[in-house]
Amino acid sequence: MSEEKNKTPDFMALYERYQALKPGPQAELKRVMNPSDLIEVPAFYRVLHTERAYPSMQRLLFCLPHIKNREGDHSLGKALAKADINEKRLFMVIRSQEPNDLIQLRRLLKQANPTLDWLSTAKTLYYWNDQAKRQLLEDFFYYQNTKPKASA
């Protein structure tokens, strides 16, 4: 039993099952206001398939509707920096506790509409903790400091 719980889910299969949903069930997942509300949405279980509805899976599917995947693309932090997300809004995510941090993050994802590497992002969300938040912040500032400046 504990071996099953320690197994990392197939993140790409989750993404593909979400993409295969019809627009109505996808919209149900987008309308959820809090990660824990997902347990009342049938589409959540369709995407989970055989996975358990752990809080880590709720985090993934709470954010997934606002992410487009392109393998090898940007990390979450770089995608948010590239979208010119205000750093104050990112700090609201970093400083907040669950579920408010995820609610704030999803708002940023809605605004940024990012295309990024889903596998990398899924791992960040699945293992969401202070270290994951710190990595998000570091990636954000690293990209901001290395991106070419627009000439005036």
Image (cartoon, rainbow, N blue to C red):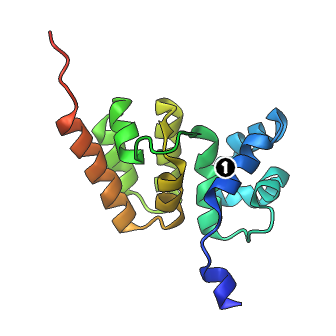
Residue 88 horizontal/vertical position (percent) = 29, 41
64 above or below 35?
A: above
Number of marks in picture: 1
Please name the amino acid that badge 1 sits on: Tyr
Residue lying furthest front? 72
Residue 93 horizontal/vertical position (percent) = 40, 51
Residue 122 horizontal/vertical position (percent) = 54, 56
Q: Is residue 92 left or right of residue 30?
A: left
Q: Residue at x 71, y 56 (%)?
A: 37
Foreground: 75 or 40?
75
Sort mark 1 into few (<14), some (14-19) or many (20+) by Cα contacts within 10 Å: many
Residue lying furthest bottom? 1
65 above or below 102?
A: above
Q: Residue at x 34, y 67 (%)?
A: 131
Q: Is residue 80 left or right of residue 105?
A: left
Q: Residue at x 59, y 66 (%)?
A: 56
Q: Quadrant of residue 39?
A: bottom right
Residue 152 visible here: yes
- The residue tagged with tag 1: helix, strand or loop? helix
Check disc 1 and report the residue beneath it.
15
Q: Quadrant of residue 54?
A: bottom right
Q: Is residue 125 left or right of residue 96?
A: right
Foreground: 96 or 82?
82
101 above or below 3?
A: above
Q: Quadrant of residue 40?
A: bottom right
Quadrant for the C terminus in the image: top left
Residue lying furthest left? 152
Residue 1 horizontal/vertical position (percent) = 71, 90
Residue 34 visible here: no
